[in-house]
Amino acid sequence: MQNLRVVLAMAAAVLLSLAAVSDAHNITKIFAKHPEFSTFNHYLTLTHLAPEINNRLTITVLAIDNAAMSDILSKHPSIYTIKNILSLHILLDYFGAKKLHQITNGTALSATMFQATGSAPGSTGFVNITDQRGGKVGFAPEDNDGTFPSHFVKSVQEIPYNISVIQISHALPSAAAEAPTPGPAELNITGIMSAHGCKAFADTLLASEAFATYEENLAGGLTVFCPLDDAFKAFLPKFKNLTKAGKVSLLEYHGVPVYQSKAMLKSNNGVMNTLATDGANKYDFTVQNDGEQVTLRTKAETARITGTLIDEQPVAIHTIDKVLKPRELFKAEAETPAPAPAPEEAADAPKPAKKKSKKAAPSPDEADAPSPDGDPADQTADENGAGGFDGRRFGGLVGLVVSAWLGFSLL
């Protein structure tokens, strides 16, 4: 009985630690205690940077007060430009007040969320941090003229080594971040894809009726998963064998009618609808992740996200290493053909009327043709993770509890 109590106590401790990790920080709640940053906090929410910050395990936010935000807003930038400016104030590393004064060789260069979006040309998305004389710490964009326009003021809140929120004196000036950013209606998404390794998919999309569906969703939110050229070119023979409607559905299957950054995809394990989703024809896939790797799983294929071409809310374009094959079009590839009858049975047995089975294996020339039905049973048999449950984490906990119980039972 004593051993059981010990095991249960250990399990409770592990559960509490997991809960602490899963809810490590909330940037909106942190700033809610500090009204001097209310404008900064408001625009972190408006630009969808707040959930990006919350999804990061290690982050530093360079906060600027309401007066500094007023200087930015006085230039009337678009919301997309504001996002770039604020992204430059989010460092992808941990810098608490103590660490700022203990930087090796006095200077550090940190990547920012602006650099991670892929929108920052060259090294313009990096910030130089220098421990200066007299206890001052200066901050400057890498593309600055060598001066330090902003300095460390105070620590707002620190959770080592998870998140550090520190105030700096002025906004970081950057011509790259402050450049006018086109709105979603002005984005040439096929041009972006063509210029970054997805030309075959982009050209096919541009020539299809599916392109109109993509354009209709630009303003409200759109995420595109574009197969890289090698993958799509290898798939073209199968694509050409699809019906006209099937081709449109496959292309629409690579778009999602909501904005999903890489960080959001990493925290949203589960089933996701697409532009092709329509009633009984679900045309969905499952998002799964393992650390930094995010995969998209259909019944017939599993593709991996290899990069991000653009991440400007409300539009994100990610590259994938394989073409996504919906079960509505490639259902047969995941099924095993029924065994043929024995020769003697075929010769002697009476031949009943033929009945078409939903599970029958198709002929080779039908393998890539659209499925005539969207059988819900096939659709739901393998949809793990729809609720965001992490079975591996739970399995690890069970293993720990069992190991502990065995250890104590041997004492």
Image (cartoon, rainbow, N blue to C red):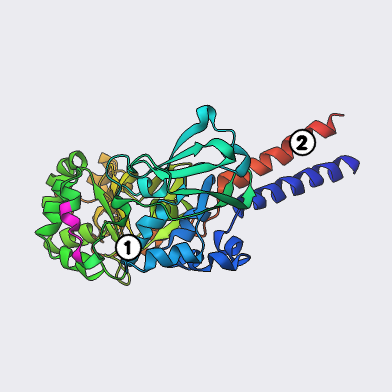
Return the residue nearer the eye: 44 or 108.
108
Q: What crowding class fits label 2: few (fewer than 14 Cα within 10 Å), some (14-19), or many (20 or more)?
A: some
Instruction: Quarter of the image for the N terminus: give it.
Output: top right
Q: Is residue 242 left or right of residue 306?
A: left
Q: Quadrant of the C terminus?
A: top right
Secondary structure mainly formed by the magenta segment = helix
Q: Position of residue 320 (x, y in %)?
A: 29, 45
Query: Tag 2, which secondary structure?
Result: helix
Quarter where residue 392 is shown: top right
Residue nearest the viewer, comparing 187 with 172 = 172
**Residue 80: assigned label:** 1
Residue placed at 64% from the left, 48% from the top?
159
Q: Could you tell me which residue is drawn at 86 percent across and 40 percent down?
A: 3
Q: Secondary structure at mark 1?
A: helix
In the rendered structure, find residue 404 and report the number of the disc placed on it.
2
Q: Give the magenta range.
A: 186-191
